[in-house]
């Protein structure tokens, strides 16, 4: 039997997506609107003075726009080494390793570390990159109920003894609902189950939480308990890339075995230098973190006043609508009022829970924020 032509098959599969209302398009971000859909939480992309200060002090090889090879060939630049040395020192850790993106980090770390007797427990709502990493690792895994550390404990009681080590994976701030993991309770699990290895993705925590902006683990005083702390640089840090904070032996294992680290071109020195520059400026941005926290709390409060549930404990604030069509209309209404906010629909979120997802930034003017609160309250 003659098979369908590739292009015909793709056409009909895409048509099926359209019929389910799950077809994705690349949106063009409108100009002149207040952007409530970016991850630029500290508003650094609009801080020209910061950027100009960076350019003014940029020297020598740090100016290069390409590293022209993998870290294992000639891409192990001074910028990469300096960034990792700074990161390890800031976090008070043995080692740090930089990656090209959070996606690379999460898809590569676990496969490089698991052994024949490893188990993985991951929050059901973990980011796709973590799920892809678990799949690539190919070991036994369970997804526990979202943010239910009681469920983690149950699974550990039942299974921890059968495995050499159990990787427990979560995000510190969840990307869809902006709720947070109780990292102290998570750390406490290690006292009862010594073979637990904690893997925490701080993509939405870095820059926004902690006394010097290192993330939720710093704020909760558990930095020493997290075995693998992944931070990303494309969000609050206004850069590109990612890193893991870990023990030296873990770093060496990753350098030897992690495929998305080994088989890709290292980030350009200028980019690594910018990440390092922003990281060093983070302790001085406490006022921005306070403002961001305050905006998140006030918006979540206004949403709760409308009778909606809102579990947000961060700068990410969901506004539940329900139906897919209604969510699209609500986004349109905010747009007409000058706010760019995107509807999030199934399958990204469960059926019947389509929503708007507000992603706040610390430089949002009070006047605009006041109008946003009015819209949320009165439609
Ligand atoms: C954004 C994100 C990533 C991916 O990071 P990139 O640097 O954008 O590839 C990983 N994990 C979580 C939780 C994220 O939100």
Image: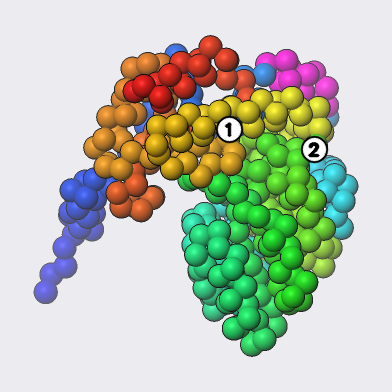
Category of crowding for the residue at label 2, using alpha-carbon neighbours closer than 10 angstroms: few (below 14), some (14–19), many (at least 20) = some
Q: CA distance from mark 1 to mark 2?
A: 18 Å
Q: Which residue is mark 2?
A: 211
Can residue 33 be seen here? The reply is no
The residue depicted at 77 percent of the width and 66 percent of the height is: 250
How many numbered tags mark residues here? Answer: 2
Please tell me which residue lies in front, 279 or 37.
37
Q: Which x, y percent locates residue 330?
A: 31, 29
Residue 88 left/right relative to 238: right
- Residue 367 place in picture, x, y as percent: 53, 12
Check the image and report above or below for 234 versus 89. Answer: above
Relative to 163, is 28 on the left or the right? left
Check if mark 1's residue and mark 2's residue have beta carbons within 8 Å.
Answer: no
Q: Residues within 10 Å of mark 1 (few under 14, many from 20)?
A: some
Q: Is residue 124 visible?
A: yes
Where residue 207 appears, as percent x and y from the top left, is 70, 37
* Residue 279 versus residue 101 in the image, above or below: above
- Please give the name of the residue rendered at 75% of the width and 60% of the height, measured from the top-left corner: 226
Q: Which region shows up in magenta?
A: 48-59
Name the mark nearer the viewer: 1 or 2: 1
Task: Tell me the residue that label 1 is attached to.
Answer: 297
User: Does any atom of ligand 1 lie closer than 8 Å to the CB of label 1?
Assistant: no
Q: Secondary structure at mark 1?
A: helix
């Amino acid at each position: 039997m003659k098979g369908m032509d590739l292009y015909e098959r793709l056409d009909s599969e895409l048509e099926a997506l359209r019929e389910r209302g799950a077809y994705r398009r690349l949106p063009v971000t409108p100009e002149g609107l207040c952007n409530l859909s970016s991850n630029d939480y500290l508003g650094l992309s609009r801080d020209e003075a910061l950027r100009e200060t960076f350019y003014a002090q940029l020297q020598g090889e740090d100016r290069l726009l390409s590293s022209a090879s993998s870290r294992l060939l000639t891409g192990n630049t001074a910028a990469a080494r300096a960034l990792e040395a700074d990161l390890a020192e800031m976090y008070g850790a043995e080692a740090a390793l930089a990656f090209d993106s959070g996606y690379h980090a999460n898809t590569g770390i676990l496969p490089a570390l698991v052994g024949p007797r490893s188990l993985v427990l991951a929050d059901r709502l973990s980011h796709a990159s973590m799920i892809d990493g678990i799949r690539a690792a190919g070991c036994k895994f369970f997804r526990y109920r979202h943010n239910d550390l009681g469920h983690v404990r149950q699974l550990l009681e039942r299974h921890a003894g059968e495995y050499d080590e159990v990787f427990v994976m979560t995000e510190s701030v969840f990307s869809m609902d902006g709720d947070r993991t109780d990292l102290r309770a998570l750390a406490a699990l290690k006292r009862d189950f010594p073979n637990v290895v904690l893997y925490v993705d701080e993509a939405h925590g870095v820059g926004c939480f902690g006394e010097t902006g290192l993330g939720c683990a710093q704020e909760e005083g558990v930095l020493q308990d997290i075995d693998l702390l992944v931070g990303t640089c494309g969000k609050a840090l206004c850069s590109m890339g990612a890193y893991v904070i870990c023990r030296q032996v873990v770093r060496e294992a990753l350098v030897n075995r992690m495929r998305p680290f080994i088989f890709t071109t290292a980030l350009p020195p200028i980019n690594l230098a910018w990440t390092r520059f922003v990281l060093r400026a983070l302790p001085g941005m406490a006022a921005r973190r306070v403002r961001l926290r305050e905006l998140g709390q006030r918006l979540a409060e206004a949403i709760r006043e409308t009778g909606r549930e809102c579990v947000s404990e961060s700068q990410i604030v969901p506004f539940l609508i329900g139906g897919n069509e209604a969510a699209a209309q609500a986004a349109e209404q905010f747009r007409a009022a000058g706010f760019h906010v995107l509807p999030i629909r199934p399958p990204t979120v469960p059926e019947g829970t389509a929503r708007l997802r507000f992603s706040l930034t610390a430089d949002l003017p009070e006047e605009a924020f006041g109008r946003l609160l009015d819209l949320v309250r009165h439609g």
